[in-house]
Image (cartoon, rainbow, N blue to C red):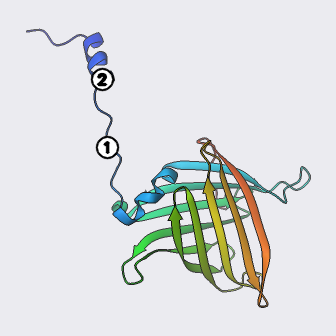
């Protein structure tokens, strides 16, 4: 008996079923559209003279019990890392966000379709912000929009607005 030819092997592999995606905690499944993607976006305040570019990478972590989001602005001038997980005591999706600026946040999020809504408390010096409310929309064309507002001195003030496009070649960088 002769081994199968390369052409036969290629044909078999082309029709082989795709691997199932790695499992996620069932409560994190609504976040799957973001997993494994890298996005690059410019902040609304970006100008040609002072560009502000954010790169954000979403990945499965801790055997699917968490999602890790890394991001950096302007090749590491600022950056952060989030771990998103199911908090069984609060019965909600929770996250911790750590930054290169030395502050951190803890919060909860809800997912409705391809829209995330979050509310977080700030620990440490974040330029006077004590809380953050944000939304992240993943559009049908794959673009992502992130908007935030900050609680400063008892008043909600506009924060950032960023429009992203998926960019697999973009890298999150830290200095």
Mark 2 sits on what residue? 15
Under tag 1, what secondary structure? loop
Is 107 situated above or below 138?
below
> Of 76 and 135, which appears nearest the observer?
135
Residue drawn at x 33%, y 22% as measured from the top left: 14
Q: Position of residue 94 (x, y in %)?
A: 48, 75
Mark 1 sits on what residue? 20
Q: Crowding near pointer 2: few (<14 within 10 Å), some, many (20+)?
A: few
Q: Position of residue 84 (x, y in %)?
A: 48, 69
The quadrant of the image that shows the C terminus is bottom right
Whole-angstrom CA distance, mark 2 to mark 1, is 15 Å
Residue drawn at x 44%, y 76% as measured from the top left: 92
- Going from N to C along the chain, the mark reached first, 2 or 1, is 2
Which of the 4 image quarters holds residue 24? bottom left
Is 13 situated above or below 114?
above
Q: How many marks?
A: 2
Q: Which mark is residue 142?
A: none
Which of the 4 image quarters holds residue 32? bottom left
Query: Which residue reaches farthest left?
Result: 1
């Amino acid at each position: 008996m002769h081994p199968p030819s390369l052409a036969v092997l290629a044909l078999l592999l082309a029709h082989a079923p795709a691997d199932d995606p790695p499992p996620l905690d069932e409560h994190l499944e609504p976040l799957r559209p973001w997993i494994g993607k890298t996005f690059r976006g410019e902040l609304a305040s970006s100008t040609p003279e002072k560009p502000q570019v954010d790169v954000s990478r979403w990945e499965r972590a801790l055997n699917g019990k968490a999602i890790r989001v890394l991001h950096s602005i302007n090749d590491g001038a600022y950056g952060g890392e989030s771990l998103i997980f199911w908090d069984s005591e609060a019965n909600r999706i929770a996250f911790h966000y750590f930054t290169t600026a030395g502050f951190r946040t803890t919060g909860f999020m809800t997912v409705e379709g391809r829209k995330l809504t979050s509310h977080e408390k700030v620990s440490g010096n974040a330029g006077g912000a004590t809380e953050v409310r944000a939304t992240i929309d993943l559009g049908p064309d794959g673009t992502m929009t992130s908007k935030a507002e900050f609680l400063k001195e008892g008043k909600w003030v506009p924060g950032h607005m960023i429009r992203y496009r998926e960019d697999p070649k973009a890298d999150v960088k830290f200095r």
